[in-house]
Amino acid sequence: MKTIIVLPAYNAEKTLELTIKDIPAKYRDNIILVDDCSKDNTAQIARNLGLKVIIHDRNLGYGANQKTCYREALKSGADIVAMIHPDYQYNPKVIDSMVSLIEDDVCDVMLGNRIRTRKEALSGRMPVYKYFANRILSMLENFIFGQNLGEWHTGLRAYKRQVLQAVPFENNSDDFVFDQQFLIQSAYFGFRIGDVPVPSKYFSEASSINFRRSTVYGLETLITILKYWLHKLKLIKCKLFISNFPG
């Protein structure tokens, strides 16, 4: 199965090469980087590394960046698409394990779980407020959607082609809540979701949204859950939950 790695990038010049070096060698010929109008040399460094580079002519947002990533990966014939942030916060070496579980038809969606233990997450310098917010929201989502995931808020993911074709991700937000909407949609449409532990680290060059934007993200996650329930109860018709392949 053809696996394509996609990198939604913004101002990643200091960490991009480190990320690429840790991606398993067998995937390095199929990497697409989408530069969301960075203010640094991310795009040029990516070209020097031999990556396929697509540049937005203006900053469209994290969700919009992923939309471009997935459109291009599907156009390029991907059977599996793995998405990782090029900020070196996540260890790319686990991509192989994630892809293998999709290739073996065990899962349709795979996540990298940063929270194997509280000690490990906090020793990686995850902010305390983010840790507890992540745990609370993840427990709520596991209960509502009948899952057993270590976390719902990771930026390391892999999808089977059929998931990207069925989920109407073009209707999702162009902002950070895109990830939550996509995962909730995947659960709603009955795709099999799994996770593997992934070491992560927070440091000055790694991207991280601040407390205010984290709060907005949390509220938008709760709003998405509310839309899910209203749609499920047929009180509204929400475009987030209307599959590209109805029936």
Image (cartoon, rainbow, N blue to C red):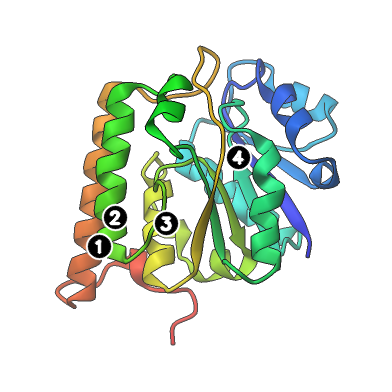
Residue carrying label 2: 141
Residue 60 in view, yes or no:
yes
In the image, residue 11 above or below residue 136: above
* Kind of element beneath mark 1: helix
Task: Between residue 223 and residue 40, name the one nearer to us.
Answer: 223
CA separation in Å, label 3 and label 2 = 10 Å
CA separation in Å, label 2 and label 4 = 22 Å
* Kind of element beneath mark 2: helix
In the image, residue 91 above or below residue 72: above
Looking at the image, do the residues carrying marks 1 and 2 touch, with CB atoms under 8 Å apart? Answer: yes
Residue 183 numbered mark, or none: 3
Residue carrying label 4: 84
Local packing at callout 3 (Cα closer than 10 Å; few below 14, some 14-19, many 20+) is: some
Q: Quadrant of the C terminus?
A: bottom left
Looking at marks 4 and 3 on the same chain, the residue that comes earlier in the sequence is marked by 4
Farthest residue to the top: give it. Answer: 204
Left/right placement of residue 207 relative to residue 38 reads: left
**Amino acid type indicated by mark 2:** Glu
Residue 72 in view, yes or no:
no
**Amino acid type indicated by mark 3:** Leu
CA separation in Å, label 1 and label 3 = 13 Å
- Residue lying at 57% horizontally and 66% vertically, measured from the top left: 107
Local packing at callout 2 (Cα closer than 10 Å; few below 14, some 14-19, many 20+) is: many
CA separation in Å, label 1 and label 2 = 5 Å
* Kind of element beneath mark 3: helix
Q: Quadrant of the N terminus?
A: bottom right
- Residue lying at 44% horizontally and 64% vertically, measured from the top left: 186
**Amino acid type indicated by mark 4:** Ile
Residue 99, position in %: x, y? 68, 56
